[in-house]
Image: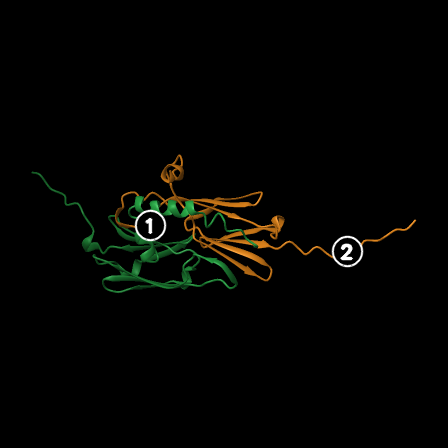
Chain colours: A green, B orange
Amino acid sequence: MVLDFNTLYSPFDRFDKLFEDFLRPGFGGQRRLTYPPLNLSQDDDNIIVRAEIPGVAIDDIELTLTDKTLVIKGERKAEDGKYFRQERPAGVFHRVINLHVPVDRDRVEAAMKNGLLTVALPKTEEVKPRSISIQAE
Amino acid sequence: MSELMKKNDKNLTQYRPVTDILEREDGFYIYMDLPGVEKEDLVIDLQEDELTVTGRTSYDAAEGENFTEMQFGNGEYRRTISLSDIVDRDRIKANLKNGVLELCLPRVEEVEPQRIQITQE
């Protein structure tokens, strides 16, 4: 055999993995069902969507913004060659993110770095929290 | 056992990066998904027959952000692959692009057949 896979097929690894999935709420279980994994957050000014999409250039990712959703679409291509092992997902992916607040469509920014996609969607002025000054007399 | 061993001093979760291993005409190729890992935080060690890849993500701490969904976070990637003698250890190449590590493992060049001269005295 050319490459020895014994460490990959070790029964202990599998056993560990089984426990890992149980002991790691939030990660693991959901991770396999939906691709790519997402982090959604917001601060006062922006809604921030982050996704781990390694191996895909930003030009190959299609971002569509509708009234209430952001759609991330793209394709991960498999490499050419004779496979001994294939764990990396390949194929078309598609995720829809519901946006609950109106965003400023013209100022949406997207960046890709080291396989991490970050999309910042600025909230419109109307929904931003603002402090109201109270005048005491 | 596993949980204790898999936590390091910084308490980072350890992941086994998903990996493809394939063969082409010029040798073997390994692809590993390592999203969020900078080149500086990636270490590849070759010790005897074991090739170990270790990398750490460095996502910024999102201050002032309120998370509604969190499906990934900071962690440490680690994976060991055993190599056979066919791989030329001196010519292994590694390249990190878009969060994917490509390892190129060329085969050892065939040893030329050689005729042995006989001397007679």
Give the SS element for disc 2: loop
Expressed as whole percent of the image width and height from the top left, the position of residue A2 reads 57, 54
In the shown orientation, is residue A100 left or right of residue A61? left
Q: Quadrant of the C terminus of chain A?
A: top left
Q: Chain of mark 1?
A: A
Question: Looking at numbered disc 2 in the image, what kind of residue is underneath it?
Answer: Gln
Q: Residue B10: x, y in percent? A: 38, 36
Residue shown at 51%/45% (left/top)?
B52
Q: Quadrant of residue A105?
A: bottom left
Residue A127: x and y in percent read: 19, 54
Q: Quadrant of the N terminus of chain A?
A: bottom right
Do the residues bearing badges 2 and 1 touch, measured as CB atoms within 8 Å? no
**Residue ranking furthest to the left:** A137
Which quadrant of the view contains residue A51? bottom left
For label 2, the residue is B114
Mark 2, other Cα within 10 Å: few <14 / some 14–19 / many ≥20: few
Look at the image and tell me whether residue A31 can be seen: yes
Q: Residue at x 25, y 62 (%)?
A: A69
Residue position marked by numbered label 1 in the rendering: A28
Quadrant for residue B109, please give it: bottom right
Q: Amino acid at mark 1?
A: Gly
